[in-house]
Amino acid sequence: MRSFFFVFLIFFSGVVRSQEVIRLSNDVLPTLRVFRPSKDSSKGIGLIVCSGGAYAFRSDAREGIPACKILRDAGITTFLLDYDLPEGNDTLPLHDAYEAIRFIRLNAAVYKIDKKKVGILGFSAGGHLASTAGTHFRNANERPDFMVLVCPVISMADSITHTWSRSNLFGSEVTPKKIKLYSNEVQVSDSTPGTFIVHAIDDDKVKVGNSLFFEAALLQHHVPVQLFLYAQGGHAFNLQNKTAAVQWTGDCTEWIIKKKWRKKWKYH
């Protein structure tokens, strides 16, 4: 059983604010950085955020941290997960994601969070990690209650995958068995959590087909899903798509807070 370590960092930006950083193991990684809403605005919802970076790095400055701040300001307690980069060990990031989910549920009272309102959000390869967490869970305590996937890598199939992400996840061992296992569009079940998906149709890095196939699989299993598509924007538009007047973050926070992801489910 892993022990948890707490570190408190102080940042100065006009006023002094403390940020809690949690080490989820004896190693340097994984860690959680906590972004707490004000006491009056808290919605009792927890959300783990996984930055993208093709499983080669974590784009926290461009993706994870801005997302955490916007969601925190909407009353959602966010936890930025700095997960282990796999370097060919495909089990590492998923293990970290499940450690984070278990930690938050175990400490739900500390963060004023409902144990049944713990979700996971991921950008690009972080979206693959989030969708893997939502399709590969082995028990109810590992299962996120909802997912938010932004321009996500979903499939490992040759025709549609983001090859750099797959190469970093698998290393040199790219086998048919692993491709099927981590192609999350074929891992969806009736117990997969409700999902909010964002993608640009002209994404030239991670094909929009990743999101379309995943949406179709969710619909076939009667899982609540909302797909937010942009006509333009390319890849990694992050929080602000400059080609569009309407941004995904408003619809997404409403979807989360109003629990549009909720569905009665039974773990098999």
Image (tube, rainbow, N blue to C red):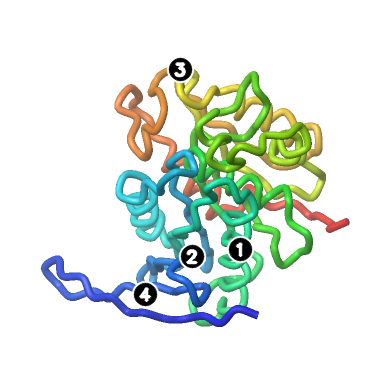
So how many labels did they put on this image? 4
Q: Earlier in the sequence, mark 2 or mark 1?
A: 2
Q: Amino acid at mark 4?
A: Glu
In percent of width and height, residue 220 lies at: 80, 32
Distance, label 2 to label 1, CA atoms, is 22 Å
Q: Earlier in the sequence, mark 3 or mark 4?
A: 4
Identify the residue under disc 3. Answer: 202
Identify the residue under disc 1. Answer: 117
In percent of width and height, residue 266 lies at: 85, 57
Q: Nearer the viewer, mark 1 or mark 4?
A: 4
Distance, label 1 to label 4, CA atoms, is 21 Å
Identify the residue under disc 4. Answer: 20
Q: Secondary structure at mark 4?
A: strand
Q: Is residue 231 above or below residue 215?
A: above
Q: Residues within 10 Å of mark 2 (few under 14, many from 20)?
A: many
Q: Earlier in the sequence, mark 1 or mark 4?
A: 4
Q: Quadrant of residue 140?
A: bottom right
Q: Earlier in the sequence, mark 3 or mark 1?
A: 1
Q: Quadrant of residue 159?
A: top right
C-beta proximity under 8 Å, tags 2 and 3: no
Report the residue at 53% width, 40% height from top. Answer: 168
Distance, label 3 to label 1, CA atoms, is 33 Å
Q: Is the N terminus in the top left, top right, bottom left or bottom right quadrant?
A: bottom right
Q: Amino acid at mark 3?
A: Asp
Distance, label 4 to label 2, CA atoms, is 14 Å
Q: Earlier in the sequence, mark 2 or mark 3?
A: 2
Identify the residue under disc 2. Answer: 30
